[in-house]
Image (cartoon, helix red, strand yellow):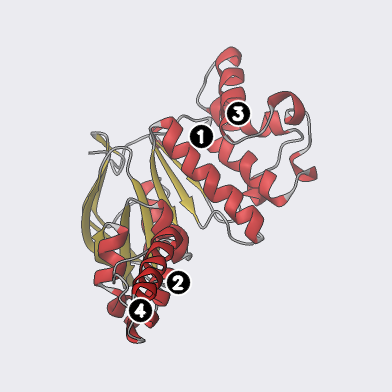
């Protein structure tokens, strides 16, 4: 397994009068090279969980093991965690600070103590991976780039560390639809081409349904559901709405059509699937 979480609990202000349990004894496993969608309402615990997976928070109890490596070991050097788990926070362009794109991307690998040749190779490779031509962009200031390009630079800086697990927390927040699609397509490509485990937190249920192989739903510090997108969204739609989450728009459309008497599959999730179902109904009506 790539990521194993065992009985993880985290209490904010532990031992204080206003202590609150943000994560409540959760356990789960993520397979190597999985693409996981992490969803939950505000206050569900997903952001706290993300910070644990990168070692930014230490659990009140429990363990997190990445490819056999216990990242919750209290004596562990954080550099060892960063080698294995990379995280791209919401609005990552706010973390850019160097005068050129090349220097910004090289900052993380440089902190790993790598030699200049290896750092240069990683910078080139990561820029290519995110669709930024090295010669065109290496000497540009990151602050002169578009919002989508800045996100690409920030993501390149993380993947230049060669992480085994890449976590992205709302990576398309604040982008226009075109920029959002660019970033989601980039993440899909990174997963396909780099044999990397991805954990993506997003409020877009439609994108989660298209991208993720596994969905984890968090609610009040616990895991409400975990399964494939089809299992989670079609079997638990009513409960998802109860806890304040949406379901993919295609599934909503399919439900409305079924309520109108159309013979539409109840488990459609993608535009292609609903199109095929509607065409099937239309062909059936023509025959009548």
Residue 83 visible at all: no
Which residue is tagged 1?
159
Residue under label 2: 249
Q: Can you tell which of label 4 and label 1 is closer to the viewer?
A: 4
Residue 118, compared with residue 260, is above or below; it is above
Q: Closest to the observer: 58 or 226? A: 226
CB under 8 Å between discs 2 and 1: no
Q: Earlier in the sequence, mark 4 or mark 1?
A: 1
Is 232 rendered above or below residue 213? below
Q: Nearer the viewer, mark 2 or mark 1?
A: 2
The mark closer to the camera, 1 or 3, is 3
Q: State which mark lies toward you, 4 or 3.
A: 4
Q: Nearer the viewer, residue 33 or 260?
A: 260
Disc 4 and disc 3 in contact, CB within 8 angstroms: no
Q: CA distance from mark 4 to mark 1?
A: 40 Å
Q: Is residue 79 left or right of residue 25?
A: right
The tag earlier along the polypeptide, 4 or 2, is: 2
Q: Which residue is mark 4?
A: 255
Q: Which mark is residue 119?
A: none
- N-terminal of the pair, mark 4 or mark 3, is 3
Which callout, 4 or 2, points to the residue nearer the camera? 4
x 22%, y 53%: residue: 28
Q: Which residue is mark 3?
A: 128
Percent across and percent down for residue 77 are: 39, 34
**Residue positioned most to the bottom:** 260
């Amino acid at each position: 397994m790539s990521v194993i979480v065992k009985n993880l609990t985290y209490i904010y202000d532990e031992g204080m009068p206003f202590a609150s349990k943000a994560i409540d004894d959760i356990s789960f496993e993520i397979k190597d090279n999985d693409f996981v969608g992490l969803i939950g309402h505000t206050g569900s615990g997903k952001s706290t969980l993300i910070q644990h997976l990168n070692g930014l928070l230490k659990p009140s109890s429990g363990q997190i093991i990445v490819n056999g490596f216990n990242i919750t070991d209290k004596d562990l050097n954080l550099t060892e965690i960063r080698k294995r788990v990379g995280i791209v926070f919401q609005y990552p362009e706010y973390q850019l600070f160097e005068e050129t794109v090349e220097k910004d991307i090289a900052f993380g690998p440089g902190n790993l103590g790598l030699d200049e040749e290896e750092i240069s190779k990683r910078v080139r490779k990561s820029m290519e991976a995110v669709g930024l031509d090295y010669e065109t962009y290496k000497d540009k200031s990151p602050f002169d780039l578009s919002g989508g390009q800045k996100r690409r630079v920030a993501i390149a800086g993380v993947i230049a560390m060669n992480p085994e697990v890449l976590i992205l927390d709302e990576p398309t927040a604040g982008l226009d639809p075109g920029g959002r699609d660019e970033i989601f397509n980039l993440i899909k490509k990174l997963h396909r081409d780099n044999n990397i485990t991805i954990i993506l937190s997003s409020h877009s249920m439609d994108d989660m349904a298209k991208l993720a192989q596994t969905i984890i739903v968090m609610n009040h510090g616990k895991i409400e559901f975990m399964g494939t997108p089809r299992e989670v969204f079609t079997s638990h739609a009513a409960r998802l709405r109860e806890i304040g989450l949406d379901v993919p728009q295609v599934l909503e459309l399919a439900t409305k059509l079924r309520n109108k008497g159309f013979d539409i599959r109840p488990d459609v999730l993608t535009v292609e699937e609903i199109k095929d179902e509607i065409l099937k109904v239309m062909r059936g009506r023509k025959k009548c």
